Image: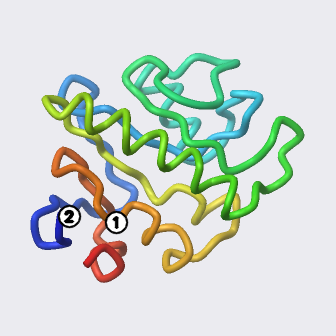
Amino acid sequence: MTSASTYRYHVDGTLPSPSDAIFVFGSNLAGRHGRGGALAARKHFLAQRGVGSGPTGRGYAIPTKDGKFNVLTLEQIKLSVDAFLEYAAGASDELFFVSRIGCGEAGYRDDEIAPMFRGAPRCCNFAEQWRRFLG
């Protein structure tokens, strides 16, 4: 299992260069990418409209809302986080810049979402606010 001290961290709200990292963002299942991190993913990382889950452009969408913008349950989000972690483990030559998915538009707290990423591969870079939850 990877410990919190082995991860890299970033200041929340910053973005990497699209050539340096894959941007991991919260999305809705309709893939509208109209607000928050999803909008940044569409504008800067070529996330495609209509793709609400999984790899898209230089991004990776983790749904936190359904196609009608209703917030998904923590259990539903966890399934998508698990799929992402498996994907990232298979692409460890990439850097995954994970935003604070679910902690903006979806309204969840850091302590509810961040622990879902415990044991993530070392190729993941997280918001500094999550450091204390990843140990």
Above or below residue 23? Residue 46 is: above
- Image quadrant holding the C terminus, namely bottom left
Q: Which mark is residue 77?
A: none
Say left or right for 32 vs 41.
right
Q: Earlier in the sequence, mark 2 or mark 1?
A: 2
Q: Residues within 10 Å of mark 2 (few under 14, many from 20)?
A: few
Determine whether the residue tagged by mark 2 lies in a helix, strand or loop: loop
**Residue type at mark 1?**
Arg
Determine whether the residue tagged by mark 1 lies in a helix, strand or loop: loop
- Kindly indicate the quadrant of the structure image that contains residue 19: top left
Which residue does the image show at 16% across and 51% down from the upper left?
122
Residue 67 in the image: x percent, y percent? 83, 35
**What residue does disc 2 label?**
1
- Image quadrant holding the N terminus, namely bottom left
**Residue type at mark 2?**
Met
Q: Residue furthest right?
A: 68
Q: Residue furthest front?
A: 1
Residue 20 in the image: x percent, y percent? 18, 30
Which residue does the image show at 60% across and 31% down from the upper left?
53
- Kindly indicate the quadrant of the structure image that contains residue 128: bottom left
Which residue does the image show at 49% across and 36% down from the upper left?
40
Q: Which mark is residue 118?
A: 1
Of badges 2 and 1, the one in the foreground is: 2
Which residue does the image show at 36% across and 79% down from the upper left?
133
Above or below residue 57? Residue 116 is: below
Label 2–label 1 contact, CB within 8 A: yes
Residue 6 in the image: x percent, y percent? 10, 64
